[in-house]
Image (cartoon, grey):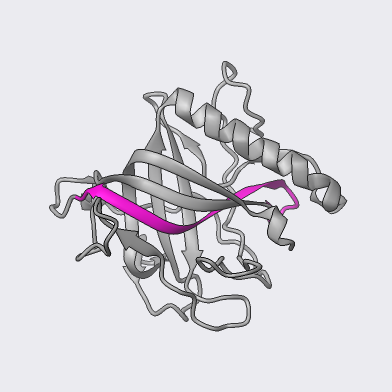
Amino acid sequence: MAKEDFHKALAHDVELLYPRLNATYRYNTAAKQSEQCPPTASGAAYTVNWKMDREAALKLFTELKAHFNARKPFNPKLGDFTTVFGMKKQDDGSVIFKAKRNGTKGDGTVNTPPQVIGGDKQPLADPAIWSGSIGTVRFYAAPTTDPDGNAGISLFFDAVQVTDPVYSGNGMDDFAERPMAKPAAADPFGAPDIGAGKPEFTPPAPRHVDLGDDLPFDHRG
């Protein structure tokens, strides 16, 4: 995949949900919750979700879809755009986006952990923050295809600035995180390194989301 396939974007001053920034985690199907694991474990990744209101979400969605369409001519096998993988509409009209950073690259080497900084742009002393923290997520968007052949945009983050961290149990981390989609098939790519040349990544599993007929988002039922 070409370096141009990766589009850098920022989600400013958003509420962070289920942030897994201090270590790699994977979903334990038996326990039905995420658990910390070594970066070399199967499915290990750093992950972060963030919430945006309808207007901001639509603007980001439009930007990401435009990137997909701009890159499609260079990879005709992609097919037509379907969705932003990991995106989910909430009952209050807000939209949650999810980005990940794999524990290892496609060649099996351990990936560089994401940068986690505070409002002073210095490394955050304790990156084990909880849901409800406020910050800015820097991520890359790339066109990918899911195991079923559906094409869309996958999100991979490389840095988070936490301006208002939460470390108590008052956030949604009191509840077990449920997977947003089925596990993805194996892929020969890894997650992008900060400042590296050509990024590598593994697409996350898809989530086709119906955001409502009143929004011009492409979706499948």
Quadrant (top left, top right, bottom left, bottom right) of the N terminus: bottom right
| Residue 113 location (% of width, % of height) | 41, 71
Kindly indicate the quadrant of the structure image that contains residue 183.
Answer: bottom right
* Residue closer to the observer: 82 or 72: 72
| Residue 192 location (% of width, % of height) | 56, 65
State left or right for residue 122 relative to residue 142. left
Q: Is residue 44 magenta?
A: no
Quadrant (top left, top right, bottom left, bottom right) of the C terminus: top right
Q: Residue at x 49, y 75 (%)?
A: 111
State left or right for residue 115 relative to residue 189. left
Q: Is residue 181 above or below residue 20?
A: above
| Residue 219 location (% of width, % of height) | 65, 32
> Is the magenta region chiefly helix, strand or loop?
strand
Q: Is residue 163 magenta?
A: yes
* Residue closer to the observer: 166 or 123: 123
Mark yes or no: residue 29 visible: no
- Residue range (magenta): 144-165
Q: Is residue 146 above or below residue 172?
A: below
- Furthest-top residue in this view: 214
Q: Residue at x 39, y 80 (%)?
A: 38
Q: Residue at x 72, y 47 (%)?
A: 151
Mark yes or no: residue 83 visible: yes
